[in-house]
Amino acid sequence: MLWRACRGNVFLRQAEIDTPLEDPSSSDQVYKSVFIIFFQGDQLKTRVKKICEGFRATLYPCPESPADRREMAMGVMTRIEDLNTVLGQTQDHRHRVLVAAAKNIKNWFVKVRKIKAIYHTLNLFNLDVTQKCLIAECWVPALDLETIQLALRRERNAAVAQCPLS
């Protein structure tokens, strides 16, 4: 299409990118290609620009002097190195955090199971709205009855001491 629109007065170089890139708008993996077009004159520049915009190609500036192009390439390489450094540090940090979490995971599983068991048991209680308390019935050994009653009295007294309004 460029060849016909510019009547053969353009030189085009293109290459396919082997690895798919993530499309920022849809997060899909997309295969892309890169190309460079050489031409002379403002009229051809306008035509090439319109065709590229029609195909939604991203246009990047290309400096005219070799020194400016070299400087631009060095800037891009520096940014790539910086990004690789940040990615490496991020992966190291993530690895350290996950290793630290892995050391405690068994303890966390035990705590979570205990908490779930407590909530499961509490969900079996009935709520007495008049006295604002939970009521439960259970079987206990006769030998432990006095110990359990003492523990209940002690906890009730501690709860009353903490809440002066009741």
Image (spheres, rainbow, N blue to C red):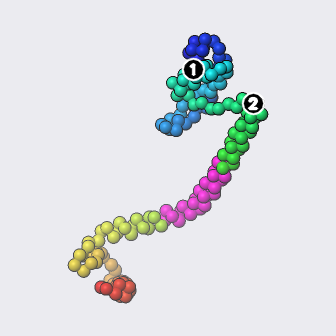
Residue 73 drawn in magenta = no
Position of residue 24 relative to residue 90, above or below, is above
Q: Secondary structure at mark 2?
A: loop
Image quarter for residue 70?
top right
Q: Residue at x 33, y 70 (%)?
A: 122
In the rendered structure, the answer to whether residue 66 lies left or right of residue 37 reads right
Residue labelled with disc 2 = 65
Q: Residue 136: x and y, percent?
A: 28, 75
* Main SS, magenta residues: helix
Q: Quadrant of the C terminus?
A: bottom left
Q: Residue 42: x and y, percent?
A: 62, 22
Residue 98 drawn in magenta = yes
Residue labelled with disc 1 = 47
Position of residue 147 relative to residue 137, above or below, is below
Badges 2 and 1: C-beta atoms under 8 Å apart?
no
Is residue 105 or residue 76 the one in the foreground? Answer: 76
Three-letter code for the amino acid on which mark 1 is drawn:
Arg
Q: Which residues make up the magenta segment?
A: 87-110
Image quarter for residue 52?
top right
Position of residue 146 relative to residue 45, above or below, is below
Position of residue 157 relative to residue 130, above or below, is below
Q: Residue 127: x and y, percent?
A: 26, 73
Q: Please state the total of marks drawn on the protein image.
A: 2
Is residue 17 or residue 126 the one in the foreground? Answer: 17
Residue 153 appears anywhere in the view: no
Is residue 141 or residue 99 the one in the foreground? Answer: 99
Question: Which residue is farthest right?
Answer: 67
Three-letter code for the amino acid on which mark 2 is drawn:
Ser
Is residue 135 or residue 132 the one in the foreground? Answer: 132
Residue 44 appears anywhere in the view: yes
